[in-house]
Structure formats: structure tokens, C-alpha cells
Image (cartoon, rainbow, N blue to C red):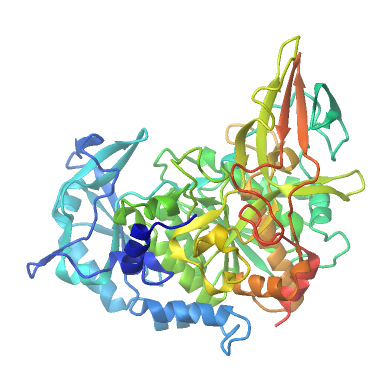
Amino acid sequence: MPTSPRRAALLAALLASALVAGSAVAAAPAQADGRRVAVPAAKPAWATAAADSGALASATSVELELALRLPDEEAAKAFALAVSTPGTPQYGQHLSPADWIARFAPAQATVDTIAAAVQKAGLTLESVPKSRLFVTLQGSAAQVDAFLGTRVHAYDVDGQQRLAAAGTATLPQPVARAVAAVVLTHPRITPGPNAKKKKPTVSPCSQYWGQHTVKLPKKAYRRSTASTPLCGYSAKQLRQLTGLQRSNLDGAGQTVAVIDAFGAPSMRRDLATYSQRNGLPAASYTELVAPGRPSYACAPADWQVEQALDLEAVHAVAPRAHLLYVGASDCGAGFDVAMSRVLDDGLASIVSNSWGSTALDTLAGSDLVDDATRQSMVVMLHQQLQAAGQGVGLYFASGDLGDDSMVADAPAVDFPASSPFVTAVGGTAVGLDRHGKRVFTTPWGENVSLLSGARKKAWSPKLPGEFIGGAGGGASELFPAPAYQAGLVPASLSGGMRTATDVSALAAMTTGFQVGVRETGTLTYRTAAVGGTSLATPIVAAQVALAQQASGRRLGFLNPALYALARRTPSAFRDVVPSAARRAVALRSGKDVLLVTVDRDSSLNARRGYDLPTGLGELTPAALAALGRP
């Protein structure tokens, strides 16, 4: 996505480095009177007069998050890249959590200063991670109003209530010097939409590609039959799909953390049932779940299938890896708390994150320059530096809405997947035959068309039909192209900016993964085919666990090594190229036939080599072996 000259100049001024958000919002204060300092651009673009629902009642409980400045952000960034880039003298010399905190984190004295101001204001200091990257506060609306020096109003934004300062927010001067961002409302973090959807299957689903077929009354792509959608691949089939059926790697000695929101009460039992039905060893499982606080139209029921999907996918690919589930308390700052819990205590070297904020990168990089939106990114960006410095790989789903144009005004990119310090995972559709061999691999992009009524004159809409979901990807509006992508990502795709995705794995709903769960309110274990980049992400995380098992060392932030391998041995990746034959599945319901074309992802096209929906391609056993070598 090319960047306009106006936007480029603006970004050059505001985003002096790849890690932009902290430096942008931590600019010199706009005003100071010796006692209080104005917070730059604290009012979001969505906080308009038309959306203003008025001031909060004085007793209303309000939470806010203060992101703290790193003492030397550029040094933290340089260190993160040096220990992650093969060939540098520091490659692989990661720090322990305590050493990273001592070297790069805000000082305890900074937190003490903030704590004193918070206490004076009558607010409660809810949480401070060991890394001191942020603090979360709680108090009445009246107390928060006094702390910020302005009234907090509610705003009706897309049917959701969001909070923002109605006027110019200020902070006590000693606090303002330490604070990089003030966040009253986070952009809603959501699981991949396809992780919680179940498509009704009228025709019998297939255990493998082509087991059951539907006769098409009108040919599609020169064919008169089409396979029914798959019932969801089993654990055995997923190992076959990833080329691991003959491998003795099982993830032993590795811990993969999964971060989602809330926690399903039946998950331990669900994992036991899944393991028994799929012939897997009992899962080694620990969960750390914070007390839930449903908010922002976000509730535990929204996340239960996501949790099962993430854990069962890791268990299927790396059955002896230890599974650590960390459940955020809500769909906002709770994710920051959960991530810091993993990083600060050194609980895992691999973290799977099947969530994100749709189009947030592009919205934050828009010509409106919504600094308040960028503020919500600061903590995550600092945590990503901490993770890389400690040798922790963060894997994020690229999104399930293709180029996001169905929800944004133009093609857009999700965050955190767009960050240059995480590995963004895109998606593919894969057909396995009855022997476990691949019939095809295409980018994941599902489009639907209907042939209805007795006459069945034409497919409607015209084939391939209406786009309903596919792997995310695109060029960032915020982050310049990192050095590790140079020479592999065409300028026509990047426009000089960071592009997502990096690698890909199985994601299509119609060729998805069979997940088992006892959903809230039921006692019955049910299975369903589930997909999305929410599936691809834990698959890749589990593959990296196998690579670490083989090498006996942690691989850390993987992107520099991934792209170095692609330059050296491109055949180590399964390149996902445009399909020679169109791939589609069909469902019959009475006289109607629904056709789902699976290989066209909105405007994101496959090409030889790097492309936006699949990145460098799928990881193969050869890639896992090569990545494990120093």
C-alpha cells in the first residue's frame, strides 16, 4: 500500500523508528504550568460531539492504563534485533527476565512517583507488572476526572460505549514525564471471527478431500461435482499435513503459552477427551486465569471455542509440549497484564496469540493521525521488545477478513500482526486425500455463490461469489520496512513499509480442524470444524516448539532467521502459488446448492515467492531443521 507524500512526511516526523508509538506519544509536553502537563492528543478521533453521550455519573467505576516510557527505547530495539539476527555477535545471547528489566525497563522510582500521585488522587493502583512497563488504575469517575483535569465522557461508537476525555487532559508534571500514553478505552481485541462460527452442513461432511461429493446442476469451473466441506482434520491428519507423520519430534521439553481472554471451566476435561479420541498422550496443561470482567461487548462465551482451538491445535502438532494457558481478565488492558505475566516470569519461550484489532494499524496511520489510537499500542510494542530481548517468540494471527476492506473504507492491516517485532501468521486451504497426501494447497479465501430454485439458471452472485473470509495481510501504515524483509518483499507490495504476513498454515473453514469442546451451558462434548488464522497461529507456534526441541535452544523472535533462511534455501518453505485449477466445495439443501470457492482472498493475491496472504509460505520439516541450526 503506497504511502502518500503528506503521510510520509508526517510519519517521518512522528515515527522516527520502527517502534513508533512510544516515541510519538512521548513527545515533549504541549503545555506546562509547573504543576500539570497537557497530555498530547489524548482525545480520540471517534470522540465527536455527535457521538457524545455526556459525562459519567460521579460514582461510575473507571479504569485507565498508563504506559510508561522506556529509559532508552532505541537501545532496547537495537538489542532485540541483535540477539535475533543470525550472524551478529550477539545472536542468541538473550537476557533473563530479571536482566532485561534491570537493563531496559522503567525504574522503580518512576513507579513510586506515579503511585504517590495515584494515592493522592484517591485512585487504586490495580496492577504493576514486574517489568514496570505500565500501570493500571481504578477509581470513580469523579476521581479520574480530577486526576486527568477534565471530565470523562461516554461516547456511542458503533453501538458500543467507549470512554474518552472530553477536554484537554493533564497530569501532574512528575507523572507526565514518566508516561508515554494514557489509555481509557482500548480498541476491542477479538478472536478470529471464524474461530467461533459453525457453518451448518446439510450434505454429509467429508473426512478427507472428495470422500463425499455433491452433483452440481450447473457446472462450476468446468466440473459437475464438488467435494463437500471437510469435517475438520484430526490430529493425525494435521501431523500429515505438516509433514510430521514420520518425525519423532513431539515437543518434549518445550512450553507453548496461549493467551486468550477468560477461561473455559471445562478445558482440562475437554483436552483429556480430545487426547483420548485422537490417540494422543494426556496433555501437560497449566492455566492461569484472571477473574473475568466482561466489557466492550466481550464475554467468556465469545472465547471458549477459541481457547479449545488454540490448545488442541498445539497439542495435535506437538503432543508432548507443555501447554500454558493465560486468560486475560477482559478484552482490553487484561491482555497486557497476561502478556507481562508470561514475559516477566519467564513462563514460556513461544507465545501463540490468535487475536488482534481489525484494521488498527491502518486506522492509526491514517491522515487523521489519531494519536489516542496509537497510544493503545505502546504497551504491546514495548512488550514485543522485551520478548525479543529475552528470546521469546510472539506469533500473531494476521486476521480473517482478507484485506479488511469489508469493514474499512479501503484495504487495511491488523495490529499487532503488523508490528515488525512479531511473526504474523497467514492462512492456507489444504486438501488431503484418503491416504493423507496433499491434493492441493492454496491461499485461504472463501467466497460463496448460490444456485437456487428448480430452474437453476445461474450462480448468484457470479462465480467466485461473495467474499466471506480469508487470511489478512498488507502493508503497514505505521512501521517502515524492517531490514530482514529487504530483497524478499517486492516494493510493489510494501511501498517501503513492513508487510504482513510472514509465514502461513492451515486456516480455511472448509478444510479446517476438528475441535472438541463442552460449551458453556452444556455437558456434552461436541466437535466442529473450525478455521481462521486463529488455527494457523497455534500450528506455527507448535512447529517452532518442534524446531526448538530438535536444536536444544530457544529460537526467540524468529523473523530475521526466517527471512535469512528464505534467502539461503527458499525450498525450505512450501511456496503457496496461484492454483492451476479452482478449488471449491459444495453443500446441498433441498433444491439449493451452495458453492464455496476456497482459493481467492479478497484483493490479496498469491504469487511465486513472498505474497501478502501466505508470506514466505508454509513451514516444512526441512525449515524446522534448518531453523534449529545456529
Q: Is residue 4 above or below residue 31?
A: above
Which residue is rendered at x = 47% and y = 72% of the image?
385
Image coordinates for residue 596, horizontal then vertical, percent: 71, 32
Query: Residue shown at 19%/36% (left/top)?
Result: 54
Q: Quadrant of residue 620?
A: bottom right
The spot of residue 84 in percent (x, y) is: 57, 78
Quarter of the figure with residue 469:
top right
In the displayed structure image, the side of residue 581 where residue 393 appears, left or right = left
- In the picture as drawn, the residue positioned furthest to the bottom comes out as 89
Most distant residue in the left direction:
33
Q: Is residue 576 left or right of 41 when viewed as pictured?
A: right
Image coords of residue 364 (percent x, y): 38, 54
Residue 128 point in image, percent of width and height: 35, 66
Camera-side residue: 596 or 269? 596
Furthest residue toward top: 454
Please report the residue visible at 43 percent of the width from the left and 40 percent of the height from the top: 409
Is residue 355 visible to us here?
A: yes
Residue shown at the point (83%, 61%) measured from the top left: 244
Q: Nearer the viewer, residue 329 or 361?
A: 361
Q: Quadrant of the C terminus?
A: bottom right
Residue sitting at the far right: 435
Q: How many marks?
A: 0
Is residue 294 left or right of 510 when viewed as pictured? left
Q: Is residue 199 visible?
A: no
